[in-house]
Amino acid sequence: MKTPPTAAETRAALARQAAFAAADAAALDGLLSVRPPEAGPRPEPVWDEATVVSHEVVRERYRRLTLSCGTIAATALAGQFLMITVPPHGGERILLPRPMAIHRRNPLRGTIEVIYGVAGRGTTALAAVTPGQRLLVTGPLGRGFEFPAGTRRALMIGRGVGVCAVMGSVEDAEARGIRATLVASGRTRGSLIGAAECAELGARFIPVTDEEGSADLPALGALLRSEFAAGPPDVVFVCGAGVLTRLAAELGAEWGVPVQASLEAHMACGLGYCHGCAAPVRTDPAVEGPLVCVDGPVFDAAV
Amino acid sequence: MKTPPTAAETRAALARQAAFAAADAAALDGLLSVRPPEAGPRPEPVWDEATVVSHEVVRERYRRLTLSCGTIAATALAGQFLMITVPPHGGERILLPRPMAIHRRNPLRGTIEVIYGVAGRGTTALAAVTPGQRLLVTGPLGRGFEFPAGTRRALMIGRGVGVCAVMGSVEDAEARGIRATLVASGRTRGSLIGAAECAELGARFIPVTDEEGSADLPALGALLRSEFAAGPPDVVFVCGAGVLTRLAAELGAEWGVPVQASLEAHMACGLGYCHGCAAPVRTDPAVEGPLVCVDGPVFDAAV
Amino acid sequence: MSETPRPTTDARRTFFAARPTAGATVDLGVSIGGLRLLNPVMPASGCFGPALGRLIPVDELGAVVTKTVFGVPRGGNPAHRLTEIRAGMVNSVGIPSRGAAGYLAELHPHYRALGPPVIISVGAHRPNGYAPVVRDLGAAGDAYELNVSCPNLDRDGTDIGSDPDAIESAVAAVRLETDKPIIVKLPVLASSIAECAQAAQAAGADAVCVANSIPALPLEAYTRAPAIGNVIGGLSGPSIRPIVLRLVWLAARSVDIPVIACGGIETADDALDYFSVGASAVQVGTASFARPFAMVEIVRTLQQRCTDDRVAGIRDLIDLWRAQ
Amino acid sequence: MSETPRPTTDARRTFFAARPTAGATVDLGVSIGGLRLLNPVMPASGCFGPALGRLIPVDELGAVVTKTVFGVPRGGNPAHRLTEIRAGMVNSVGIPSRGAAGYLAELHPHYRALGPPVIISVGAHRPNGYAPVVRDLGAAGDAYELNVSCPNLDRDGTDIGSDPDAIESAVAAVRLETDKPIIVKLPVLASSIAECAQAAQAAGADAVCVANSIPALPLEAYTRAPAIGNVIGGLSGPSIRPIVLRLVWLAARSVDIPVIACGGIETADDALDYFSVGASAVQVGTASFARPFAMVEIVRTLQQRCTDDRVAGIRDLIDLWRAQ
Ligand SMILES: Cc1cc2nc3c(=O)[nH]c(=O)nc-3n(C[C@H](O)[C@H](O)[C@H](O)COP(=O)(O)OP(=O)(O)OC[C@H]3O[C@@H](n4cnc5c(N)ncnc54)[C@H](O)[C@@H]3O)c2cc1C
Ligand SMILES: Cc1cc2nc3c(=O)[nH]c(=O)nc-3n(C[C@H](O)[C@H](O)[C@H](O)COP(=O)(O)OP(=O)(O)OC[C@H]3O[C@@H](n4cnc5c(N)ncnc54)[C@H](O)[C@@H]3O)c2cc1C
Ligand SMILES: Cc1cc2nc3c(=O)[nH]c(=O)nc-3n(C[C@H](O)[C@H](O)[C@H](O)COP(=O)(O)O)c2cc1C
Ligand SMILES: Cc1cc2nc3c(=O)[nH]c(=O)nc-3n(C[C@H](O)[C@H](O)[C@H](O)COP(=O)(O)O)c2cc1C
Ligand code: FES
Ligand code: FES
C-alpha cells in the first residue's frame, strides 16, 4: 500500500496553497474592467496542426514547447493565447484543449513558444508530446496587452509562469523602441523565467523571489517605487497573481498610469461561445459579465 | 483525417471472424457437461505480487510473460488459470483483471509463464508491462485437466493461444510417464505455439495450419485417425475452438475415450461469486448453470 | 470503441481543399417535422456559436443549434463554470442569456448568416414558461428545441423533462404558438425515457433529442471542495455514450417521431452507433472543443462510407453491417 | 482524482502481517438502525461472495452483503454477462438466485461463518414481492437491503426504485415482516433521488444505499452488435463516481437516516469523498475484482488517517480538511 499523502505536512502545504489562491482571488475583487474599443482589428483565429520543434525542461519546474505554426506565429499579438488540444497518451484522453499564453513569436521562422508547468491531468499528458509530433492548436485568441499611444517606458510584472503572458509585450517593446522593465517573481531563483529573453531583447530584468524575501509585496513595492523614482513607466502589464495585480494597480494609481492584467479561467472553446470563462468582473447579475477568452484575457486594472 | 477502416475488406474480414465465432459457438452446443467430483483437493487460490521476469514477443503474434510467483508456481494444476490485474498505463485504467491460462509452471524456480495475444484494451495495456515490474495476480483458479486413472497415452489439441491451456497437461504427462501428442493448430506455421516445449518435454508435436490446409477439420480428423490407428489415446484434452472440440468429441466417441475441453468466458472475479462467466452448458432455465471459473474452465465434452 | 482519429500532415490544407459534400451523390438528408436538413449532423446546444464559423465551414452541417435562450436576460453561474475530470467534462455555465429580445437583436442575425437551418434552443423554469419565449421568438427559428432538461440551474430540483406530465403541458402550449418543428430535449435522469418521449409525441412534438449531460458533483482532490462554482454540473463527453445509447434505443422503440441522439459523439463511428440503435440525427457537443472540425469530419466521413459501400444512405450502411 | 495506489514489494506478506484494525484506538463504528458495524466499509451486492474470504481477512469489514436473493430460483442471463469498455465495467448477470430456501440452506451458512454482520440483499419484480422473501428469510439477515434498483432484469421497464410510491409500499410491507434494519438501495435513473429517499424513510427504512450501476448499452466496435447478451447492462466503476456523488449529496440532505454510498469507490480517498458529501458508510463493488483487498485497504487507510491526524473518527477527519 502506498503511503497516503501524509496528514500534517500535506495539509499544511495545501493550506498554504488555498490561502494563496483565496488571497489572490480576493485581491482582484473590484479591480478589473473591460478596456475601451481596440485600436486595430484582431487577427482571425485558425486551427492548425503545429509540428513540435522542441520540448524541453526549463528553469527547474517548467517545460518549453516550441511549435512550428506559421499561421499563428505570423499574426499573434502580444498577450494572446492559444488552445492546445492534448493528444491521447496511452489511452488517457484529455477532452478539453488547454489555454496557453504565447510566450514567444518568431514570424520569420514560423514558430511560437509556450512555457508551462506540469500541474494536473492535462499538462501531464501534454508533457508526453515529443518533437516531430503534430499538435492541434487554435489561435491566436483573445485580446492582449496594448501599449497606450506614445508609450516610451513600460513595466511588465509576471509571477511564475505568468511571465510568459507578458513576454510578447516585451518583444513588442523592443521592436517599437519602448524601454521595457520585466519583474519576474517566483519562489526561487532557479524557477524564474525571462532572464535570457530580456538579455536578448535588451530589456531590464529584475528577479524577485520568495526565498530572498524580495518578492514580498512591501519589498517589491518599495523596489519599484525606487526603480521608477526618476520617472514612472507609461503603462504596467501584469500577470500571474492577484496580489501582484493589486500592487500594480496601486502603483498605477500613484503614478497616474494605466495597468493591464492578464487573467486565467477554465476554458472550453476559447472563442466566446461556451460561456465557460466568466471573468471576475462585477456586473449587473441579470447580465452576463465579460468572458476571459474574448473580452480578455487582458483587462484594465485600477484600484 | 484517418482513412476509415475500409469498407469491403474490413467487412469481409469481420464477416469471416463473425462466421468463425458463430460456427464455434454453435459447434459447442449440447457438447459440454461438468465432470464428476474431483480426485483431489484444489490448491487454495491466493493473490500475490508477481515480478515480471521477462516479457517477449513469441511466434509472430504472441507475447510470453514469465512471472516470478512462488505461491502459484508451486501449486497450480494443469489447465488452471490466473487473473492478471493489468496496471494502469499512461492513465488508461483497466478495471477487470484478465484471465490467462497458466502455460508453464516451474515450481523449482518459482516461475510461471503465460502466453497471450494482443487483442483489445486489456491485452494492449498488459503489453506495456516491463521486466522487473510487479503484477498483481490471483491464482491458481478453476478446475483443470485431469488424467483418468491409468492413462498411458494422451492427445492434446490446441488452436492458437489455446495451446497454452493444454501445455500444463503435457508437462504432467512427461512427469508421469504418459505419452503425449500435441496437435497445434493455427493460421500459419509462424504462429504455432508448442514446438519447443514439446521438444523439451519429449512429447510428439503435430503442427497443422490453415495455410497448408492441414488444419481443416476433415484433414485433421483423417490425420488423427491414422496417427492413432494402432491404438487410440486414453484421453483427449482440447482448447481454443468449438469446432475442434466437436471434432475431439467425435473422435472420443469413436475411440470410446473421454474428452475434456477448456473454455473461455468473460470474467470479473474468477472465484465464482460474480456469476459473470456462465458456461454454455444447457441446464434447467430456472437454475443457474455451471460457471466457467469454478466449474471449469475444463468441462467434459461428448457428442 | 475506436480512438479519435487525428488529422494527418497538412490537415488544414487538405481539410479546406476538400469539400466532399458539395458534389456529393449520396443523400444524407433527414426531416424533422416539415424541416428538411441536408444531413443529420448538428451541434449540441451550448457547444456552438457563430464564432465557430470562423474556424470551420459551418454550411456543411445539417443545422445549427443555438445556446438555450430564456425569456428574460440571465447572468450565469460563478466561476469555475466548467472543468475536466477523468470521467469527462463537467459544466455549470448556468445558461447566461440575453433574453428573447436580446437574442433576436444581437445573436440571431449571426446564426442566420451561417447558412444552415437555425434551431433555437428555448429554456424556462416552469412548464408554461416555454410558450411565451417561442411566441416572442416568432418565426425566427426554423425549429425550436425545448431544453426541458438543463440540469445546471436547480441545484437539487427535479427537471421539468423528467416528468411526462410537465413535458406534455409544455409542448402542448408551445404547439399552439408555432407551426415550426418542435424538438424536446430530454434529460438522462428520468424514471422512464419512454414515457417522457411518448409525452412529447402525444403533445405534438416533431422530434425528441436524447439526451442532455448527466448531473454530477466533481470534487477537488484532497480538499474535497466542489470543483465548480455551482457544486453540481453536467457531465458530458465520451464516457456518457453507453448510457445515452441505451436511452436513444429505448426512445426510438417507443415513439414514431425522429430521435436526435446527443451524448459523447466524437466520430462518424460514434454517430453510426447511435444510428444503429434508431437515431435519425446526431448532435455533437464536447467533441467540438478539442477538435473544432469534428462535426464537419463526421458529415464527410458518413458521406465517404456510403460512397465506398455504394449505398444510398445511412440506413443502408447500417443494414449492410447488420447483415454480416 | 487520485490514482489507485498499487501495493509495494512483498505486499502480500506486509498485508497479512499487519492487522491494524485489531488494536485500533480509533472508532470507525457506524449504526444502521439498531445494527452496529465495526466500521463503515462493506461490499456491494453481487460483487462479493464467501469465496472472497479465501483471499482476504473479511472479518476486518464492517459487514458483508449478499448477492440479491429472489423468492424463487432464477437462472440468470445468457453470455456475455459482463464486459469492460473504456467508460467502465458493464454487467447484466441477470441475478441468478437459488431462491430464499436455497439461499438459507446452501449459502447463508458460508456468509455467516465470515464473521461480520450479514446484510441480505433482497430482490423482487413487484413492490409487494419483497415482503414475502424477507418473511421466508426470517431472522437470518442482520439487516435487509432491498434491491429496488437492479436495472438488469427488465430490458426497458421502469425500476421499482424510481417510483417513490412503489418504494413506499415495498418498504412498508417489509417493515411489517422484520425488526431488522431495512436498507433501500436506490437507482441512478430516477427523476428525484430526494423523493425516493424520503419515501423510503417515511415507510420505515433505516438507511438508503445510493446507488446502483447505471443502465447502459455497450456496442462492439464495427459490427455494432450488443456487447452483452442482455443488450442492456449496468455500468459500474470509477467513471460513475461523480454522478453518484451528487445523488449521495442530495439524498443525505433530504433524509435523516444514514446514507450508504455505492458507486466507483476504489480507495479511502474515494470513500472520504462520499463521507464529505454526507455518506455514513460505503459499499465497494467493481474495485474488488482487480484488487481483492481493496475493501480491507480502505478500512486500514481510514484508521491510519484518523490516527495520523489524532482525530476520533471520520467526521472529524473531514471537518479538519474543511477547516483548511
Ligand atoms: C489565457 C490562459 C493562458 C494560460 N497560459 C498558461 C501558460 O502559459 N502556462 C501554463 O503553465 N499554464 C497556462 N494556463 C493554465 C493552463 O491552461 C492549465 O489549465 C493549467 O496549467 C492547469 O494544468 P492542467 O490542465 O494540467 O490541470 P488539470 O487538472 O488537467 O485541469 C482541470 C481543468 O481545470 C482547468 N484549469 C486548471 N487550472 C487552470 C488554470 N490555471 N487556468 C485555466 N484553466 C485551468 C483545465 O483547463 C481543466 O479544464 C493558462 C490559462 C489561461 C486561461
Ligand atoms: C480461462 C481463460 C483463460 C484464458 N487464457 C488466455 C491465454 O492464455 N492467452 C490469451 O491470449 N487469452 C486468454 N484468455 C482470454 C483473455 O482473458 C482476454 O480477455 C482476451 O485475450 C481478450 O483480450 P482483451 O482483454 O485485450 O480484450 P478487451 O477488448 O480488453 O476485453 C473486453 C472485455 O471482454 C472480455 N473478453 C474479451 N475476449 C475474451 C476472451 N476470449 N475470453 C474471456 N474474456 C474475454 C475481457 O475480459 C473484458 O472484460 C483466457 C480467457 C479465459 C476465460
Ligand atoms: C459548456 C456546455 C454548455 C451547454 N449548454 C447547454 C445549453 O445551453 N442548453 C442545452 O440544452 N444543453 C447544453 N449543454 C448540453 C449539450 O448540449 C449536450 O447535451 C451535452 O453536452 C451532451 O453531449 P456531448 O457529450 O456531445 O457534449 C451544454 C454542454 C456543455 C458542455
Ligand atoms: C457483476 C456485478 C453484479 C452485481 N449484482 C448486483 C446484485 O445482485 N444486486 C444489487 O443490488 N447490485 C448488484 N450490482 C451493483 C453493485 O452492487 C453496485 O451497486 C454497482 O456495481 C456500483 O458500485 P461499483 O461502482 O463500486 O461497482 C452488481 C454489480 C456488478 C458489477
Ligand atoms: S472559453 Fe468558451 S466562452 Fe470563453
Ligand atoms: S468470473 Fe466471477 S463467477 Fe466466474
Image (cartoon, coloured by chain):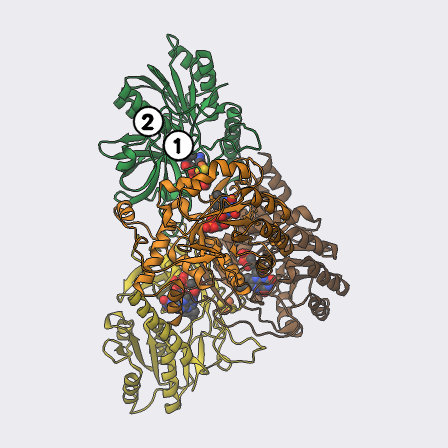
Chain colours: A yellow, B green, C brown, D orange
Amino acid type at mark 1: Gly
Drawn side of residue A198 relative to residue D113, left or right: left
Q: Is residue D297 above or below residue A19?
A: above
**Residue at the far top in the pictured view:** B230
Residue A288 placement, left or right of D43: right
Secondary structure under tag 2 reads: helix
Beta carbon of the mark 1 residue lies under 8 A of ligand 2: yes
**Numbered marks: total:** 2
Output the chain of dot 1: B
The residue tagged with tag 1: helix, strand or loop?
A: loop
- x then y, percent, for residue D301: 34, 56
Please report whichever mark, 2 or 1, sits nearer to the chain's N-terminal start: 1
Q: Can the viewer see residue A54 in this picture? A: no
**Front position in the image: D316 or B110:** D316
Task: Please name which of the two marks, 2 or 1, marks the residue nearer to the observer.
Answer: 1
Give the residue number, with chain letter if any, for mark 1.
Answer: B142
Image location of residue D64, percent across then percent down: 44, 47
- Using the image as rendered, state which of residue B93 and residue D309 is in the foreground: D309
Check disc 2 and give the amino acid type. Answer: Gly
Q: Residue at x 57, y 40 (%)?
A: D230
Q: Residue under circle 2?
A: B168
